[in-house]
Image (cartoon, rainbow, N blue to C red):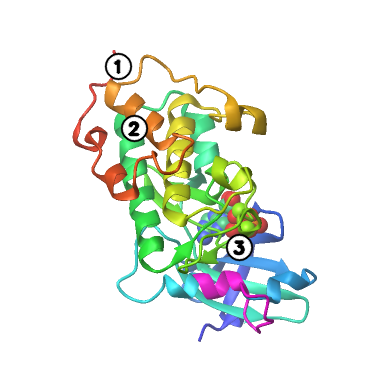
């Protein structure tokens, strides 16, 4: 196990809906760092597993554990251990050194080149495909739940607090527990939905946001009915990938394996002058 008393808690590095995240360094080996995600115990529902049975383990931990057996995916943040304190649960996570959230990276970088975007999207797809292989639907992919390390642009998917196990049964709208930016129209409409097409939609949403610096849809109305405004200066392959991931009908939408095989990933776009 992990001995928390060996660590000295440092700066607050992030804040989410339910918890605070701190960096902590090993007291003797200062270079060894972890991220501590501390969550108040007051949210009763956080003790329940996906079938509504109460469990001693957070659903978030249970979902992450599915992803921790070797071989692991380097694009998913590692869960070292967790501890239960009187009022808190603490997840002991791999600390992503010199990273930014994708949200911040997009803000700071301004116009992101397609080559950079391609590098990030490859890693996001790898993380997503790994999740599907292990039967995990993340359910809350958005730019604050993706970390990017600098300058190497390594991507780490974080925050499995809304994750659900993928079973033979489709999901209902209420199974999408995330902030909503990545929610596919079939879920919003209240129909049942499947993990893979929902992931593809989210991949399209992320690629759009990386290439435009803003959300593809600013509200529900435009998500359901609006047309997408794609920057005409993007390469045709990039425009094609975005539009095919953001097809509202999940049956017509690109499939997950087709996303990975899309020609945009084989091109190198000349950098703009
Ligand atoms: P919540 O479930 O409350 O949204 P998150 O797991 O998304 O919490 O973490 C909140 C923020 O903390 C993230 O957006 C990120 O900025 C930061 N963070 C979380 N985990 C790590 C980590 N392992 N390394 C570095 N920063 C992290
Ligand atoms: Mg979060
Ligand atoms: Mg969360």
Secondary structure found at label 1: loop
Which span of residues is magenta-colored? Answer: 50-63
Q: Earlier in the sequence, mark 3 or mark 1?
A: 3
Neighbourhood count class around disc 2 (C-alpha, 10 Å): few under 14, some 14–19, many 20 upward: many
Residue picked out by circle 2: 241
Q: Nearer the viewer, mark 2 or mark 3?
A: 2
User: Where on the image, by quarter, is ligand 3?
Assistant: bottom right
Q: Residue 194 location, x and y as percent?
A: 48, 55
| Residue 59 is covered by the magenta coloring | yes
Residue picked out by circle 3: 161
Disc 1 CB within 8 Å of nearest ligand 1 atom: no
Alpha-carbon distance for marks 3 and 1? 39 Å
Total marks shown come to 3
Neighbourhood count class around disc 3 (C-alpha, 10 Å): few under 14, some 14–19, many 20 upward: many
Query: Relative to residue 187, is residue 133 depicted above or below?
Result: below
In this view of the protein, can residue 27 be seen by the observer? Answer: no
Q: Quadrant of the C terminus?
A: top left
Q: Main secondary structure of the magenta part?
A: loop
Question: Closer to the camera, 73 or 188?
Answer: 188
Q: Residue 203 location, x and y as percent?
A: 43, 42
Residue picked out by circle 1: 272
Residues at marks 2 and 3 touching, judged by CB atoms closer than 8 Å? no
Query: Relative to residue 158, is residue 197 depicted above or below?
Result: above
Q: Earlier in the sequence, mark 2 or mark 1?
A: 2
Residues at marks 3 and 1 touching, judged by CB atoms closer than 8 Å? no
Disc 3 CB within 8 Å of nearest ligand 3 atom: yes
Q: Nearer the viewer, mark 3 or mark 1?
A: 3
Residue at 53%, 43% (x, y): give it.
143
Give the residue furthest to the bottom: 1
Left or right of 241 on screen, residue 156? right
Secondary structure found at label 3: loop
């Amino acid at each position: 196990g992990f001995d928390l008393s060996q660590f000295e808690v440092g700066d607050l590095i992030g804040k989410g809906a339910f918890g605070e995240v701190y960096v902590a360094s090993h007291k003797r080996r200062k270079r060894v760092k972890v991220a501590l995600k501390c969550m108040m115990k007051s949210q009763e529902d956080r003790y329940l597993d996906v079938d509504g049975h109460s469990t001693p383990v957070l659903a978030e931990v249970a979902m992450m554990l599915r992803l921790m057996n070797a071989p692991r995916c380097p694009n998913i943040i590692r869960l070292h251990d967790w501890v239960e304190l009187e009022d808190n649960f603490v997840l002991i996570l791999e600390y992503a050194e010199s990273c930014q959230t994708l949200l911040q990276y997009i803000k700071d970088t301004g116009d992101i080149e397609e080559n950079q975007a391609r590098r990030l999207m490859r890693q996001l797809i790898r993380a997503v495909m790994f999740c599907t292989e292990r039967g995990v639907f993340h359910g809350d992919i958005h730019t604050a739940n993706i970390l990017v390390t600098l300058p190497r642009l390594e991507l780490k998917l974080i925050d499995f607090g809304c994750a659900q196990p993928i079973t033979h049964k489709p999901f209902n709208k209420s199974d999408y527990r995330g902030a909503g930016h990545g929610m596919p129209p079939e879920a919003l409409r209240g129909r049942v939905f499947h993990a893979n097409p929902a992931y593809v939609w989210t991949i399209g949403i992320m690629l759009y946001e990386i290439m435009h610096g803003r959300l593809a849809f600013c509200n529900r109305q435009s998500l359901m009915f609006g047309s997408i405004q794609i920057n005409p200066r993007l390469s045709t392959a990039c425009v094609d990938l975005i539009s095919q991931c953001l097809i509202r009908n999940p049956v017509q939408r690109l499939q997950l394996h087709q996303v990975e095989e899309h020609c945009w990933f084989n091109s190198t776009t000349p950098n703009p002058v």
